[in-house]
Amino acid sequence: MAKALNNMTNQDHATKIFSEHGDYIKTIIQFKVSDKTLAEDLFQDFFLKLITHPIPENIKNIRSYLYRSIINDIIDASRRTKRYQLKLKNYTDVIKSNDDRRKTNVTELEREDLEMTFQALTKQLSKSEAQAITLRYMNNYNTQETAEKMGVKSRSISRYVSNGLNKLRKTMAYQGEDE
């Protein structure tokens, strides 16, 4: 019961401070913080702070105390945001490095198996189609790079790749029917 009375007193005290100095508090926050949503959050948080941590009675210059307290709250909020952003960056770096490791962890045996399968499949294609698909998908060249390597136009590479992939799909579909 005593705690409820104390909180009620603190709330009344905070309400009185905000009725007398609310515009001053809001002006300081808006001047220091460019994000309107953050400024409104800080304004509301400051009211709650005054309820839980009322201004000591021995304070002579309330405006000076409010200013310093608001600035400290803004600095704390900025630090929290920076820590949160750093944690997010570290988390994304860890995720990215795990993905990179997974991509490079293909064993030599798997790589050889993949190459043998790819070579077997490309035997079903014309020389140009096989070369275009090999450069595009095994060597990870883009269409322009593949065209330069083969000495043809990009449009030809697109046609070779498209025709070759269609033949491979048909071959694989046909092999799938046998199984």
Image (tube, rainbow, N blue to C red):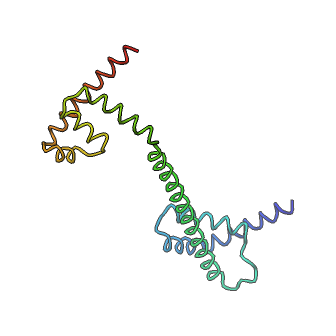
Q: Where residue 70 appears, x then y in whole percent?
A: 60, 74
Of the pair 101 and 50, the residue shown nearer to us: 101
Classify residue 156 as left or right of residue 75.
left
Q: Where residue 9 appears, x then y in whole percent?
A: 77, 67
> In which quadrant of the rendered view does residue 106 lie?
top left
Task: For the N terminus, give its image quadrant.
Answer: bottom right
Of the pair 96 and 170, the residue shown nearer to us: 170
Residue located 60% across and 70% down the image = 76
> In which quadrant of the rendered view does residue 80 lie?
bottom right
> In which quadrant of the rendered view does residue 71 lie?
bottom right
| Vertical order, 103 against 113 (above or below) | below
Classify residue 149 as left or right of residue 42.
left
Task: For the C terminus, give its image quadrant.
Answer: top left
Point out the residue furthest to the left here.
152
For the image shown, how many numbered marks are present on the structure?
0
Of the pair 161 and 129, the residue shown nearer to us: 129
Q: Where residue 92 appears, x then y in whole percent?
A: 50, 54
Point out the residue furthest to the top here.
178
Classify residue 132 as left or right of residue 4.
left
Classify residue 34 as left or right of residue 129.
right
Q: Where residue 66 appears, x then y in whole percent?
A: 63, 77
Point out the residue furthest to the bottom here.
60
Point out the residue furthest to the right here.
1
